[in-house]
Image (tube, helix red, strand yellow):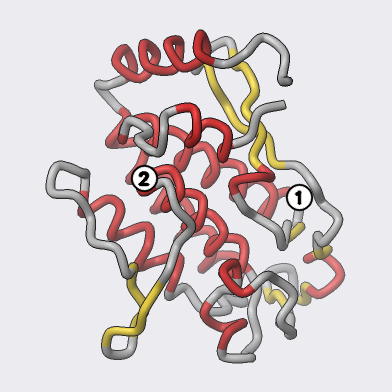
Amino acid sequence: GFNLLYVVNLHKGNVPEIVAIHYTHRMLCHLETLHLKGMFLHCDVKPDNWIIRSHPEMVSDLMLVDFGRAKDLAAITSNGSDVGALYGRVAAEDLECVTMRKEQKWCFDFDCYGVCVCAHTLLFGTYMEIEQVGDRFTLKKPMRRYWQTPLWRLLFDSCINMGPISDLHEYAKEIQGLKLAFEAHLRGRRRELKSLLLAQDEMLPKKKE
């Protein structure tokens, strides 16, 4: 199937922002299900591993593939909600979350950092680079003036600087808050989004060459 990277190239690096918001919202929804219901970390969240699939209501949805590096959270969870830490640098350098770069323990922040990489690719057409400003990390590239900057800043600041949250309830509150923020921006723009996704679907080859 076609992945997110293919979609970015299809739009020549200029994916409509509302489409980027839609796909980022879907990534957050899928991570919420994977982490909190499936009790797995994917550990390789990147644009190549999100496959476009059709959906009767939203035209275009995503499916996460390639679970070869996945970690079973149930095996390291105690007392029902206390998730144990993971260690080691297990990703390519540009996909390493902040705690991994610091050689500290990591958990949900690794997959959430991957969502930021994907969102950045949708917005800018390039992989994400970060820099430290004070005690937090932020994007090197500036946002465009006409973007929904507060929404994107919320995502990037929260997920890049998330750290190794070990409590399931705390993490659930964090990712659900992000998901609701993206839902709010989609509300009232469903017709516009559907039109753009239908046009995108027409641009996709019927069979991948």
194 versus 74 height, above or below: above
Task: Please tell me whether mark 2 or mark 1 is closer to you in this view.
Answer: 2
Q: In this view, does 55 lie to the left or right of 138?
A: right
Query: Residue at position x 40%, y 73% from top?
Result: 130
Q: Which amino acid does label 2 sit on?
A: Leu
Q: In this view, does 178 lie to the left or right of 34?
A: left
For the N terminus, the image quarter is top right
What is the secondary structure assignment of the residue under circle 1? loop
Query: Residue at position x 56%, y 90% from top?
Result: 102
Tell which residue pokes out farthest to the left in this image: 145
Q: What residue type is labelled 1?
A: Gly
Q: Nearer the viewer, residue 36 or 69?
A: 69
Residue 15 numbered mark, or none: none
Q: Which of 154 and 20 is in front in this view?
A: 20
36 versus 141 height, above or below: above
Q: Name the residue under label 1.
A: 38
Whole-percent x and y of residue 20? 40, 37
Q: In which quarter of the image is residue 75?
A: bottom right
Query: Residue at position x 52%, y 37% from top?
Result: 26
For disc 1, the neighbor class at 10 Å (few under 14, some 14 to 19, many from 20) is few
Could you tell which of marks 2 and 1 lies nearer the N-terminus?
1
Residues under labels 2 and 1: Cα distance? 29 Å
Q: Name the residue under label 2.
A: 123
Whole-percent x and y of residue 182? 36, 41
What is the secondary structure assignment of the residue under circle 2? helix
Whole-percent x and y of residue 134? 27, 89
